[in-house]
Image (spheres, rainbow, N blue to C red):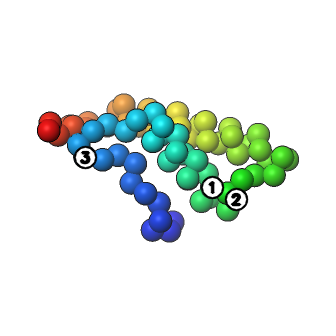
Amino acid sequence: MCRSIKPLRLPDRPATEQEIQEAALQYVRKVSGYRKPSKANEEAFNKAINEITEATRSMLKNLNLKVTEL
């Protein structure tokens, strides 16, 4: 993977729903090689984003994370 992938979770707070979805989109774009899929591939592209979003949510929920208090 290339170094341009941005970190999702900051150490001082949990990831937001928007950040989780944006990370899933970034991952699918990187792996597929497409910024925007063709109409023929749009359903598979969006399905992958949804599945990765759900997997990310599940992983973050199950990680033993401690949010630093400000």
Looking at the image, the residue that sits furthest to the bottom is: 2
Mark 1 surroundings within 10 Å by alpha-carbon count, few (fewer than 14), some (14 through 19), many (20 or more): some
Mark 3 surroundings within 10 Å by alpha-carbon count, few (fewer than 14), some (14 through 19), many (20 or more): few
Q: Secondary structure at mark 1?
A: helix
Amino acid at pointer 1: Arg
**Residue hosting label 3:** 11
Q: Is residue 28 above or below residue 44?
A: below
What residue appears at the point 55 percent right and 53 percent down from the top-left corner? 27
The answer to whether residue 21 of the structure is visible from this angle is yes
The answer to whether residue 55 of the structure is visible from this angle is no
Q: Secondary structure at mark 2?
A: loop
**Residue hosting label 1:** 29
What residue appears at the point 47 percent right and 60 percent down from the top-left corner? 5
Q: Secondary structure at mark 3?
A: loop
Image-based side of 31 in relation to 63, left or right: right
Report x, y in % for residue 63: 31, 37
